[in-house]
């Protein structure tokens, strides 16, 4: 396989996703999120480009997928980033798989996904919209659609009968962790599942946050570089702090009877196996 590959083939012990395949029509991303982890391993990440011979390669690769395979679109870029307006690779991919026995988990920060609903099956798709922050969207995700546009997209998708997931992450201490509960309350009527997780720092993303929020720079440094610990190239907050941040949201979700999953926290049983990304909604 070239462009479609098995998600997490190394089976990280912190990942509780069901088996799925991953596809990124573009290399890099134009949304410019400060906390993005993919900038640490993909060169020139914020200078996105379309994948070479995308359609030709994909046409061949989809014939090799097992029946009913779940394709996650996308994990280290956004399928509806600004380049999609010009190249429409995501749309072309949806056209290709429209009548095939494949299932989709679309993960985006863009309301551009509404453009393609004519090609997206309600039965075979879960759409996950990331809402990281309401207060700081222009600072943290400068080129992505605003909080309001994403919320409208979620409401529209729900109205149209899609299974909708909201990713309320990454939660960054001192920056957006305190607004997470209000965001979940606002999203609650329109979503089938939420995903929460804390910010796992990479040296470059941490530097970007420290530059953008200079008053918080020393707090972030202390929490991550002095008190945190490395796991698989990421720096995790101390366990107790992660629990405090996450429990605020998971307890609210429990009260609201809203399904909730954690992403790569390794805090069981709060992180339920197979329930993190929302792809379980495809099966149930
Ligand atoms: S949308 Fe996702 S892939 Fe794109 S910059 Fe933001 S975090 Fe990175």
Image (spheres, rainbow, N blue to C red):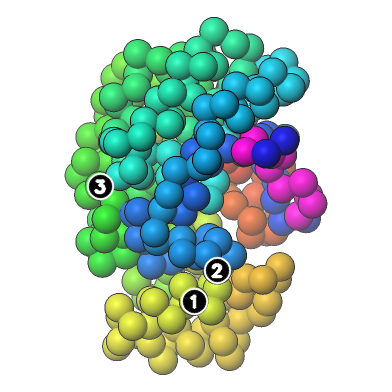
Outermost top residue: 99
If you read the primary sequence from the N terminus, does the residue marked by circle 2 or circle 3 appear first? 2
Residue that appears at 36% across and 30% down: 88
Horizontal arrangement in the rendering, residue 201 relative to residue 83 (left or right): right
Crowding at mark 2 (Cα within 10 Å: few <14, some 14-19, many 20+): some
CA separation in Å, label 1 and label 3: 23 Å
The mark found on residue 247 in the picture is: none
Horizontal arrangement in the rendering, residue 135 relative to residue 75 (left or right): left
Image spot of residue 47 (x, y percent): 39, 59
Image spot of residue 270 (x, y percent): 64, 51
Q: Are marks 1 and 3 in contact (CB under 8 Å)?
A: no
Residue that appears at 51% across and 17% down: 96
CA separation in Å, label 2 and label 3: 23 Å
The mark found on residue 145 in the picture is: 3
Report helix, strand or loop for mark 3: loop
Q: Which of marks 2 and 3 is in front?
A: 2
Residue that appears at 30% across and 26% down: 114
Q: Do the residues labelled 2 and 1 touch (CB within 8 Å)?
A: yes
Instruction: Identify whether 67 is placed above or below 243.
Output: above
Residue under pointer 1: 204
Q: Are marks 2 and 3 in contact (CB under 8 Å)?
A: no
On-image quarter of the N terminus:
top right
């Amino acid at each position: 396989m070239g462009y479609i590959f098995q998600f997490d083939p190394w089976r990280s012990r912190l990942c509780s996703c069901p088996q799925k395949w991953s596809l990124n029509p573009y290399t890099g991303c134009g949304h410019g999120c400060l906390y993005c982890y993919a900038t640490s391993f993909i060169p020139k990440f914020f200078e996105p480009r379309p994948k070479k011979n995308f359609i030709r390669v994909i046409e061949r690769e989809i014939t090799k997928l097992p029946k009913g395979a779940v394709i996650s679109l996308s994990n280290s870029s956004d399928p509806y980033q600004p380049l999609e307006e010009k190249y429409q690779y995501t749309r072309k991919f949806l056209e290709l798989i429209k009548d095939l026995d494949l299932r989709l988990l679309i993960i985006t920060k863009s309301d551009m996904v509404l453009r393609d609903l004519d090609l997206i099956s309600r039965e075979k798709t879960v759409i996950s919209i990331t809402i990281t922050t309401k207060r700081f969207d222009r600072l943290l995700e400068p080129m992505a659609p605003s909080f309001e546009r994403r919320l409208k997209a979620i409401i529209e998708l729900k109205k149209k009968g899609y299974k909708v997931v909201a990713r309320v992450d990454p939660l960054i201490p001192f920056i957006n962790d305190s607004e997470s509960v209000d965001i979940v309350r606002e999203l609650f009527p329109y979503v089938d599942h939420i995903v929460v997780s804390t910010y796992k720092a990479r040296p470059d993303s941490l530097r970007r946050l420290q530059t953008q929020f200079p008053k918080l720079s020393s707090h972030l440094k202390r929490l991550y570089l002095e008190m945190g610990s490395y796991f698989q190239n990421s720096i995790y907050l101390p366990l107790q702090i992660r629990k405090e941040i996450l429990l605020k949201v998971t307890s609210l979700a429990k009260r609201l009877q809203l399904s909730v999953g954690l992403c790569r926290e390794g805090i069981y049983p709060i992180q339920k196996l197979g329930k993190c990304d929302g792809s379980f909604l495809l099966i149930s």
